[in-house]
Amino acid sequence: MSLLRKKDVSVMMDQKSHSKLARHLSGFDLVLLGIGAIIGTGIFVLTGTGALYAGPALPVAFIISAIVCALAALCYAEFSSMIPVSGSVYTYTYATIGELVAWIIGWCLILEYGLASSAVATGWSGYFQSLLSGFGIGLPTMLTAAPGAVPGSETFFNLPAFLILMVITFLLSMGIKETKRVNNIMVLVKVAVVILFIVVGIWYVEPGNYTPFAPFGISGVLQASAIAFFAYLGFDAVTSAAEEVKDPGRNLPIGILGSLAIVTVLYVVVSAIMVGIVPFKQFEGVDSPVSLALKVARHDVWSCSSVVRDES
């Protein structure tokens, strides 16, 4: 029966009162923390993968995934306000179902964060290599991806992905106050880049690329929704910082639901612009779809400039 024993909430709250963790996070910090955890692979990588299944209906796929995530987020918001201690869903399961299920959930969380971190690092690596190629710099092929990740190429190790993970790990080890500052700056820059893409890219949308809207039917949209759901992983990371929040009962729900709402709007708008600029079939095998969309837009600008020069 010890495997089914539950942890008393009052004991958890007593342990929280003796916690040495400093409370530095406000509701605004939690919203930025959630945005930073969610925006990444989803908007910069998975949009291209999802487009191959949903076609121009990709924004609908993101909306469906957002609705599912919102239901889970409401549960997280409720539990986090009732039990404002670190541990996220592991803690909630321990208090409501028991130790065995909590142990399983704990390992699932480790696997989730491991998978999400590796995916984000890989996506960052793809964009970083794209940036280097713009300056005529190329890394050795064997250091650009994991073994077997690139068909037809011999690869051994993704060096940029490893380095960014080490940098982020070092930042986290410095403490929540320093981490908060760095995260807030990085998130504001990231959101600024996304907004810049929206402002620039909307002028190069071709309405013809939205036809047919759902080439693979509702099944394709649902497949893309399953992929897009992975893009939303991270909003639960807000609850992991519960013991470092100034007013957890109020700020945790704000951080969870606020970050999810903002990210959903950005996902839908960016995906709509991307499939409007680039025909969805061209995203096959592309690790940096946003970069591809910008390249296509730049090509259109050059083509228009050439036509103007020729007519002159």
Image: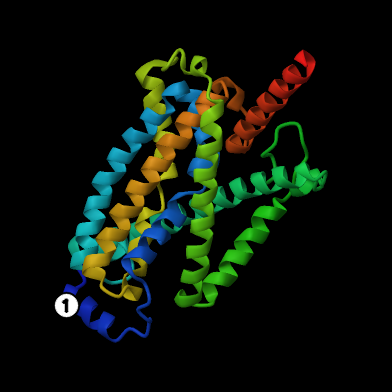
Please provide percent x and percent y for residue 256. Answer: 31, 56
Left or right: 311 with respect to 165? Answer: right
Q: How many marks?
A: 1
Residue drawn at the location 54% of the way across and 29% of the way down: 203
- Rendered image quadrant of residue 277: top right
Please tell me whether residue 306 is drawn above or below residue 226 in the rendered image: above
Please provide percent x and percent y for residue 63. Answer: 34, 34
Give the residue number, with chain letter if any, for mark 1.
Answer: 10
Q: Quadrant of the C terminus?
A: top right
Q: Is residue 71 visible?
A: yes
Please tell me whether residue 247 is drawn above or below residue 34 in the rendered image: below
Left or right: 65 with respect to 185? Answer: left
**Coloring scheme of the render?**
rainbow
* View extreme (front): residue: 312
Left or right: 140 with respect to 205? Answer: right
Mark 1, secondary structure of its residue: helix
Residue drawn at the location 32% of the way across and 70% of the way down: 242
- Rendered image quadrant of residue 226: top left
Residue drawn at the location 27% of the way across and 51% of the way down: 73
Q: In which quarter of the image is the N terminus?
A: bottom left
Please provide percent x and percent y for residue 218. Answer: 35, 19
Query: The disc labelled 1 sits on which kind of residue?
Result: Ser
